[in-house]
Amino acid sequence: MQRRQSSKNSKQPLQVRHSNQTDLSAWRKGGRTDPEKSLQNRQSRNSQVNESKQDSLEQAVSYFEKVQDRVSLKKNEVLQKHLATVESIALQKGLPPEAFDVLLNVALSGKLADAVNTRLLKSLIPASVIPETSVVSSVSWLCVSKCSGSIQLLFVRWLITVFDFIDHKEQLHALYGFFFSFLQDEKMCPYVCHLLYLLTRKESVKPFRIRRLLDLQAKMGMQPHLQALLSLYKLFCPELVSITLPGKMKTYFKNSEGPWKAAINTIRRRNQENSPVSQPLFLGTAQHQSRKRKWNTQLVIPASSANTNSLAGDKEKNHVDLYSTSESFPVEQLQTFSQLLQNIHHLEFPSQMGSVLTNPLLLHYMNCIKDESIYLRLYYWMGQTLQEECSWCVVDSNQYEEEFKDFLETIYKTECFLQEGFSSCEEFLYKSLPLWDGFCCRSQILRLVTWIPLSSFSEMKSHLYDPLAQLFFTSSLYFKCSVLESLKELLQNWLNWHVIQLDSESDSQGYSLNTTLSGLVNVVAELIHFVGWISTVALRLESNATFLLYFILDFYETVCDIYLRYNLPLLIMPPAGVFYPALLSMDSVSLNQLCYIMYRYRTNLVAAKENELIKKKILQFQFSSQTYQEYNQYIIAMVGCLWTSSAFQKDIHPQGVRLDDEVLKKTRVQEFKTSFNIVYHPAMMGYALLFLQQAWPDDNTFNFSLIKGRKWNWYLQYLYAQGLKGLKLFIESSINRVSRASQSKEGNVQV
Amino acid sequence: MAVVRPFDKLPALNSAAVLLVGSDESLQQKLAEAILKEKKNFKISIHLATSLPLPSERDHLRPRIDLIAFMIDIKSKYSLKNVEASLAHVDASFFLGKVCFLVTGVGRVNYCSVEMNAIWKLGEVYCSPVLYCELELEGIRVATAQRLLRMLQICAGHIPGVSALSFGLLMRNSADE
Amino acid sequence: MAEKLPEQMSDYQHVPPEIVNESVGHADAKEELLDECESIWRQMEECQSKLTLLGTETLPESDAKLSLLMMRVKALTAEYNQWQKRSPEIISTNPDVLVALGKEELQKVKNGLEMVLSTVQSKNKKLREDLKREQQWHEEQQQIVDVLNGIEEEMKNQVVQFSEKRAFQELKNKMLKLRTYKEELLNALGEFLEEHFPLPEEDGSAKKKKKNSSEEPAVELVTLHEILEILINKLMSTPHEPYLTISDSFWPPYIELLLRYGIALRHPEDPNRIRLEAFHQ
C-alpha cells in the first residue's frame, strides 16, 4: 500500500477537541501556575523533588515531540538521557495523561529504532487516565505501516492491559472495523481477538464479521481466542451464530498483561498510601469528584459515560446519529436516587464495569434491565480481576491481602444486592477452594460460597463439597459452624431463587418447569445429604458439642419447611447421627429446637399428603414412602422418650436407643424407663427441679415422681411459660392426649 | 534400613507423636514450633527428618509414631522427589489413615515448579489426604498446625469412636469412588 | 494384620474420666478407675504382643494403590465387624465418678450455651440490619417499578396521539437527513480515495516493472474510486449476481488491497471475478 505522503503531520485524522484537557501545550503552560497545584503541595517535603522531576519529564516529552528521524541511541546521549527520564518517572509515578500523545506518536511513527520504541512503549504506565484521542491517533499510525510488526504487537498488548484506563471509548469503538481487519495477521490474531472482546457491543456484531471469524476458524482450527469472540457474538446475536461452541472455557486469552501490570499495581498502591484516605480497590465510583489529571492525584479509574461529548459534536455537524437515538445521562452526574428515577430511561453504563459494584444507584439500574451483555461485561471484568489477583496470600503483603478481602467483600455485597450469584465468582471459588488452607480470607470466601449458583452435582461435588469436607473435618469447631452457616444460606438462596422462578414462570408451560424442577430437587437434595453427612461426622468428632448442634439444627429448620415455605416438593429427614444426639442432648435449647423441627416436618408432610389426595393425580414428585417411614420411626422414639417412657422398648430405628433390659439394669438406675421423659430428661431436669420448688416449697426431697396427674399438666404449662415453644408445638400436634384431665401418657402418632 | 511402622511400640500414656518429613528444615522447624504453641490436653512429641529411612541406632529413643506428615514445597521439585523416595521406607499399614501430605507454597501458585497434578496423584495412590497451605505466613502456619493436631489426636486414638482408618476414609476425595 | 488394628484402636479409645475432687472419701472411686485402666492396659499389651509378631510390609512400587485398597477393604471390614459385635458398655456406677462426670458435662453444656447465646445475639443484630437494608432496597425497587410503569404509560399515550401525517413528515425528515449524510459520506470517501489512492503515475516504478515483464499494450487504468463504485452498484442493482470480472484496467495492487482487507471477495470458483463484501447483510 502506497501513500503519497504521510498525512500525519498535516492533517489529524480526527480533530482534537479544544475542550479537552489533554492538550500538551495547555498542560505545559499551565504547569506552574495551575490553581490545582495546592493538591500536590500536600506532600510539601516531596514537592521540591517533584517539581524537578516534573521539569525533566517535560523536557523529555518536548524532546520526543521534536525528535528527528533516525537518531541513533548509542551515539546520542541526549536521547539516552531523556529516555531514561521517561522510564524512571513512569515506573515511579506513572505518566500523566498529557504525555501519552507525544510518546505514542514517536514510538509508532518509526522515526526511531525499534529498541527505543520498545522501551518507550514499555514505559507507558498511566498515573491516572489515558486520553482517548492519543489512542486514536496512535491507531492511525498502524495504518501507515511505519512501525515493525513487533511494535504493533506490543502496542496492541499495551492497549489490552490499559484498556480500563482510557478515559472514553466511543471513538475507539468507531475503529472496531479497523482492529477487526488485523485478525488477518496470524501473530496479532490472539491479541486482536482479546481487544475486540473488550470492545464488542451488540451493534458490532455483523453477519460479515461472523463469516470472517468462521473462515478464520476453518483455516486455523479451534482457537480459544476465536471461540471467545464467537461466543460473545453468539451471546449478543444468537440468531446469527448458529454453530455450537463449547460451554465453559477456563481461560480464553493468554495473559497479555506484559510488562505493565506489575508497574501499574505498584503505582496504584503507592498512590493509595500517599492519599489521606485509603481508597478501596478498583472503585472508580461516580461520586468521585476529583477528575483532575495531575501528577500526584490518586489513581481513579474513570466512571466515564461514553458518548456525551461526541453527541454534542455530531449535532453541530448536523449529522444523523445512527446508533443512539436518545441523549444519555452521564453516569458521573448520577448522585441521588431521585436523579436515577428521572433519568432511568436514558442511562448508559460506564465503560469501567467495576465501578458499578460500589454504586447502589447503578446496581438498582442493573437490577431493572434484562440486558445480558451488561452481566457479561461485569463477569468478564470480574473474572479477569479475580484471576489476576488470585494469588491471595502472597507472602509479606498484608496490605495486599486486606485489599483483596475488601474486593471479595464488595463482590459479596453486590451479589446480595442483585440477589444473584456471579458465574465469574463461582469459577474463582471452584478454582481456589481445592487449594484453600481454610484460613486466608476465611469469612469472605465462606460468604461467597453462599451465592454459588446451582449447577450439576458432579461439578459441585468435586469443586465444592470435597475440598470443603476435607477442611471441615480437620478444622476447629468454629470453622465447622461457619461452614454450616454458609451452607444454610446457600440452601436458602437456592430456595429463594426457586420461589422467584416459580413466580415469574407461573404463566408459562408446565413442562419446561418440570425438567428444571427435577434437576433442582436433585441438586438441593444432594446439598442436604451432604450437610447431613458432615454433621453426623462433626458431632462425633466434637463429642456432640452444643454449639455445633445449634448450627446443625438451624440448618434443618430450613430443611423441614421446604415444601410449605418454598413450594419445593422435597423433604429430607435428618440422619440418625443428628437426630439422636439432639434428642438426648444435655441442654433444653437443642431439644426444643428438635421439637420445633419435628413439628414442622409433620405440618409439611400432612400438607403434602392432603394435596396429594385433593389433586388425585400422581405427582411427579411424591415424597418417598421412606420419608414417611423415617419420620414415623423418629416420632416413635421421641414420644417414647419424652412422653410414654417406652423408647428403650419401642424404638424401631436401627440406630436408635432400643436397649435390652439386661443392659439397662446394669446401670443400676431404678426407674430407667422414665429416664428421658420431660421430667427426667437431662435437658429438662433443671426445669423439673425449679417446678418442684415452686409447687412444694417446703419439700426438699426432690421427689420428681410427684409430677403426675394434674401436676403433670401444670408442669407442662410451666415449661411452655419458660419459652419452650418448640416443645409446646410438638406436644400439642404430635401427641394425642386422650383426656386432658386424666393422667394419660399415651402418645398417638399420626401421619 | 529401618522401615517406620505404626504399631511397633506401645503408645505412651496421654501422648501422641508426629513425624514431619521434608527437605526444608527451617520451615519444618517453624511448623513444629507452631504445633508446640497450641493448647492441648495431651503430651506431644514432634520428630523431624529431612528424609526416610530414620537412623536405626536411635530407634529405641523414639516413641511410637502416630502420624507422618510429608512436606512438599510447591516451588521445589526436589522436595517432591525427596518425599517420593522416602515413601518406600514406610510400612504399608501406615497408609491406613496415618499419613498426610502437606503442600506448602500455595500462595505462590504462579511460581510453582511442581506439577499440581503430580501431588494430587500422590495423594491418590497412597490413599492419603493432601493439605494445602502457605507455611511462610504465620496465620496460615498456625491454622495448619491446628489442623495437623486434630488429625494427630484422631490417629493417636484420642477421639472416642473415630479410628485413623475411618477418618482416612472420610478425608478421601470421592472423585475416585 | 489388618484384623488386629481395629481391636487395638477401640481398646484405648476410652480415656478414663478424671476425678476432679480428690478427697479421701473418693479414694474408692479412684481405685476403681485405676483398676479399669490397668485392665485396659493389659489388653493393650496383649494386642501389642500379637502385633509385634507381624512383619513389615512396604508397598510395591508398581501397584501401590491396588494393594493399599485391598488392605483397606480388609481393615475396614474388620473394623465394621468389631463395631457390630460390640455391645454397649456401661460406665462406672460409682456415684462419685458419676457426679464428677456429670459436673464436667454440665460445665461443657454451660460453655456451649454461652457461645450459642452470644451467637444468637449477634445473629439477631445482623438480621435487624439486613431487614432494614432489604426494606430500603425493596422500597427503592418499588419506586423504580412505579416510575417505569409511568414511563410506559406515557409512551402508550404518545403512541395513541401519534398522527399518521406527523409520522410521515418525521420519516421524510429522517430520509432527508440520511440522504445528506450519505452524500457527505460519499464525498468524504471520494476525497479520501483521491488523495490517498491515486492512479499510479505513468513512470511509476510499479508500472515500469509490469511493462518490462510483459509485452501487453498499456490499458487506460481506472481509479480505486471507480472500482469501488462499480462494485457497490453491482451489488446494489443485481444482488443475485454481484460479481465483476477483473479487467486489465484494474491496477492489480489495488485489487489485492481490497481482497486483503476483506472489502472485496473472490468468486469461489473463478479467481478472475470479485464482488464487494456484503457489509449490509
Image (cartoon, coloured by chain):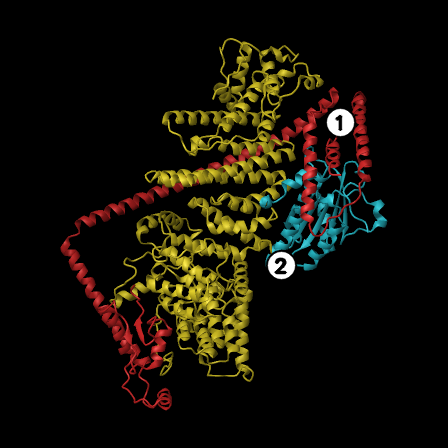
**Residue that label 2 marks:** B112
The correct choice, above or below, for A11 with respect to A93 in the image is: below
x and y, in percent, of residue A719 in the image: 54, 19
**Residue that label 1 marks:** C19
Where the N terminus of chain A falls, by quadrant?
bottom left
Q: Residue furthest left?
A: C165
* Letter of the yellow chain: A
The correct choice, above or below, for C55 with respect to C180 in the image is: above
The numbered dot on residue C86 is: none
The image quarter in which residue A23 lies: bottom left
* Letter of the chain that mark 2 sits on in the rendering: B
Closer to us: B161 or C65:
C65
Q: Colour of chain B?
A: cyan
Please check whether the numbered discs 1 and 2 fall on a single chain. no
**Element under disc 1:** loop
* Letter of the red chain: C
Q: Amino acid at mark 1?
A: Ile
* Letter of the chain that mark 1 sits on in the rendering: C
Q: CA distance from mark 1 to mark 2?
A: 53 Å
x and y, in percent, of residue C54 in the image: 80, 40
Q: Amino acid at mark 2?
A: Cys
Residue drawn where x is 62% and y is 13% of the image: A704
Packing grade of label 2 (10 A; few <14, some 14-19, many >=20) is: some
Say whether residue C262 is left or right of residue A551: left
**Element under disc 2:** loop
Say whether residue A747 is left or right of residue A685: left
Say whether residue B43 is left or right of residue A465: right
Packing grade of label 1 (10 A; few <14, some 14-19, many >=20) is: some
The correct choice, above or below, for C259 with respect to C75 in the image is: below
x and y, in percent, of residue A327 in the image: 29, 58
Closer to us: A311 or C211:
C211
Q: Is residue A278 visible?
A: no
